[in-house]
Image (tube, grey):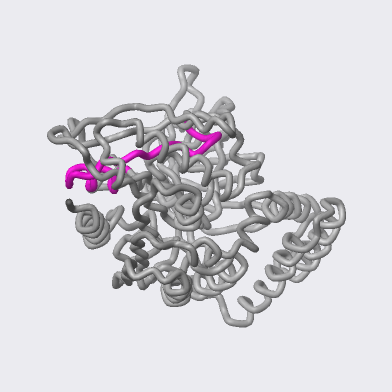
Amino acid sequence: MKRFIPVLLIIFLVHCLPAAAQEHKFEGNWLGNLNLGSVSLRIVLKISKTGTDSLKAVLNSPDQTDKDIPIDKVIVSGDSIKLFVNMIRGSYKGKIADTLLNGTWSQSGREFPLSFVKRDKIVGINRPQNPKKPYPYKEEEVAVLNKDANVTLAGTFTYPEIGENFPAVVLITGSGPQDRDEALMGHRPFLVLSDYLTRHGIAVLRCDDRGYGKSTGDFNSATSKDFATDALACVEYLKTRKEVEKDHIGLIGHSEGGIIAPIVANETKDVAFIVMMAGPGLNGEKILELQSRLIAKAEGVSDEEINKMMQYNIRLYQIAMNEKDSTKAAAEIHKVVDEMYNATNNKDKNSSDKERLFKQTTNTIMSPWFRFFLSYEPKDALSKLKIPVLALNGTNDLQVPPKENLAAIEKALNKAGNKKYKMVELPKLNHLFQTSTTGSPTEYSKIEETIAPIALSTISDWILMITKK
């Protein structure tokens, strides 16, 4: 429930064509801004010579990724340049004028003005909270075995250098394939969180998701319940560590991780507490409806367009939840996608774009994870919890809206007769717990802060309070 900014650029091999004598004009670093209407993306273009005097180039979209992306083809003719990224039907045509490069980005039948300014140096992404080694605590690379699933999770275990019998936590990532740092757009939230907790006397285990990073297994076939068995294996691992106080093992789940943590806690008596960071209290269908409306509104989409979009989305959700026959479901999805595409105002529509949209939509809607997420009721697990629970959200969270979800969590915990919970709503924080302006996902990469200090201290202080001897 974190990554909703569409990836504009995809990695390809570089195949550079011979260039003209004026190639040197284009060499260097170029910085531009691509305005997509409701979204504005910084684009970095780096052009250099190859050993054969032809040109090669890479693109970078700092607001989406910190990786350089090679371009398929570079063609220079006089003062003009053309760049091609064929598989996503993306291209750029520009004309140089001193230190300016003015042109147009084209993709999937749409065109957007895109101008670059030449820069001697492109300032990289600044993430001041990322800790620097050497750390003032112990850090170990570990392997956690989930025997029943035949999955080995690669992870990092950190614990204070001095002392013993520390309270310990397992960090559980949000949706989508995640590494142990929950890295996205240059941010590494779980690295920052684990560093803070360990410096304050709490041992931390964080692992790459199954089938991702250095962990084995199949991510695409797994649901939240499968990920819960991985988290349970992590709890079992912590019980083997002499540094850990066995009665003080807890779970911290962010976003989808907040769904998973209560499932795990109901499977074992070895979980002593839970922290839900923007954890849902509502089922996935309700979450997605609220989320879609709030994000679209924050990006300037009209109420009329939002309502149209939601009508299509709700039909797709119903197909995923109710049609078990894959062939019939695909046919129904195709019908909805066809209506959606025909209703757009894009004058350059073509069948290949529509087919691509159909495949993407079908892969998402029909995935085991999505089907489970839509209908799963978090209250079922929450209403059985008797252990201490800290549930916190930011007031600017548009992905798991705080008002509706915190209320649902509290209602479920009350049903359980739980008297040991704490609900916290942190002002101005977004879904990643960054201090934000609107909470829109388009802000995530532009905010230098990874996790607001108030969120870090709230979690750490609460854990130390409930585990004090």
In this picture, residue 87 sits left or right of residue 144? right
Asked if the stretch drawn in magenta spans residue 194, the answer is yes
Nearer to the camera, 130 or 116: 130
Residue farthest to the left, as pictured: 162
Could one spot residue 359 in this view of the protein? Answer: yes
Which quadrant of the view contains residue 226? Answer: top right
Nearer to the camera, 84 or 396: 396
Residue 311 lies, in percent from the top left, at 70, 75
| 241, above or below 226, in the image | above
Total marks in image: 0
Could one spot residue 101 in this view of the protein? Answer: no
Which residue is painted at 37% across and 27% down in the image? Answer: 142
Residue 102 lies, in percent from the top left, at 47, 52
Which residue is painted at 79% across and 68% down in the image? Answer: 339
Which quadrant of the view contains residue 91? Answer: top right
Nearer to the camera, 76 or 178: 178
| 145, above or below 203, in the image | above
Magenta span: 191-213
Which residue is painted at 61% across and 52% down in the image? Answer: 106
Residue farthest to the bottom, as pictured: 304
Nearer to the camera, 7 or 223: 223
In this picture, residue 284 sits left or right of residue 171? right
Asked if the stretch drawn in magenta spans residue 143, the answer is no
Residue 469 lies, in percent from the top left, at 17, 51
In this picture, residue 130 sits left or right of residue 256? left
Residue 74 lies, in percent from the top left, at 56, 34
Which quadrant of the view contains residue 303? Answer: bottom right
